[in-house]
Amino acid sequence: MEIQTLEVRPQQGYPVYLYLPQQTLLEVKNGDTVRITVSYSYRGPAKTLTLYGAIGHKLVWFDEKVNGSRQISLPDSQSWISRTDYVDVLINTAQIPAGTGYDMYAKFMEGSSDLVISPELYDVINVLAMNPEFQNFQISNWAKV
Amino acid sequence: MSFVLSIKNAPSGSQWWRAEYCGGLISSGWLGINQPWNCPYTAYGATDVIVSVFDGNSNLKYKSLPFGPIHDGQEYVHDCSQSMLVWPAEASQFRNIVATSVYPAQARVGQRANVNFELEHLGASERVTLYASIGNQGLWFDEILHTEYQYTFPEHSVWTKQYMFAAIDITSAISPGLYDAYAKIKEKNLVSPTLYDCLTVLGNQAEFYNFLISSYQKL
């Protein structure tokens, strides 16, 4: 075998389920905002791209319920640079019904084209209902008054 | 013709020159600044040759002290900057052209890369066409991009290394990949060895690596 080129790539991150100590379960309700932070390495020309985040259910494809996006300006770089950026997603229960075990993912888009898509995180969001909820409702005492 | 006399390094703006010896009895008459005097008269071993240089309005720009001796059958050059007689430079020669590097080693379409090369020159000043190309060396060199420009090498009395470069615009004619380069002097057919794998043309697309959701939180 003849080696023709060698490319130095940035250090490979650990798989998500390893380097997130625990996939924190967020409980959110209508009107809350979830901030999704992404980390990545970039190489390429200066570009302004759309960072897009979505919450929904991963089935065969990702069934998005709510999403958010934000313009990110990436600098011209001929070598790999490490970056972190975030995108906020507003929880609107008119679009995402109360429920448990919602998933999320993020991606960069140029126009309507997806440039890179993150692995999905599973079962990380619970959306609480807005109607009154009771738990552990029982008679704790009784007396003559 | 008994001897040849020419001048070099005349003051700027000079257009004419003349020479005389034998107490002014023998004169070249008016000569163009780059025109040698093919003297038809015997040199007599004269030591009283005087060179005068004039501008376009016949104003004297330079006059030498008497110099010599001069002899028949010789070729002489009077250097006005040093006011002395020098031997004519050897014919211009080039050798050892080598492409040394391309800078930057990575470039994108729209950028410019310099092919750096060096060569050795000896002899008289000469204007030549320097040429450099980027492409792929196979059985022959498949040129994709190239540039050329004219350059005048000054006179060198000994073999002298000259460090040169040729700037090549990276255009969409070349695809992303790894390329070779070479340089040459067109008129001399003097070609450098190929410099392999010296330029990486990067794509104009954004590249990502390790794109992950690193955290999430409720604000």
Image (cartoon, coloured by chain):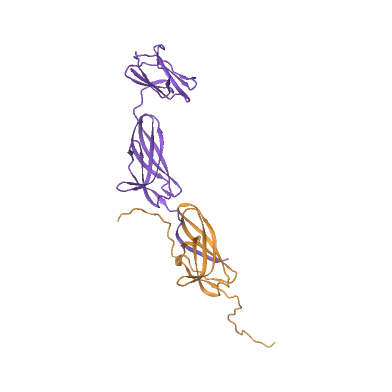
Q: Quadrant of the C terminus of chain B?
A: bottom right
Decide if residue A5 is on the left or right side of residue A91: left
- Residue that lies at the very extreme toward the bottom in this rendered image: A144
B60, A68: nearer the viewer: B60
Q: Does A17 sit above or below residue B4?
A: below
Q: How many marks?
A: 0
Chain B: what color? purple
B4, B93: nearer the viewer: B4
Query: What is the x, y in percent for residue B44?
Result: 34, 13
Decide if residue B196 is on the left or right side of residue B54: left
Query: What is the x, y in percent for residue B89?
Result: 36, 26
Q: Does B147 sit above or below residue A19?
A: above
Query: What is the x, y in percent for residue A71?
Result: 54, 59
Q: Residue at x 48, y 52 (%)?
A: A76
Q: Quadrant of the N terminus of chain B?
A: top left
Query: What is the x, y in percent for residue B15?
Result: 46, 23
Q: Residue at x 41, y 41 (%)?
A: B166
Res. B70 image quadrant:
top left
- Residue that lies at the very extreme toward the right in this rendered image: A145
Chain A: what color? orange
Res. A96 image quadrant:
bottom right
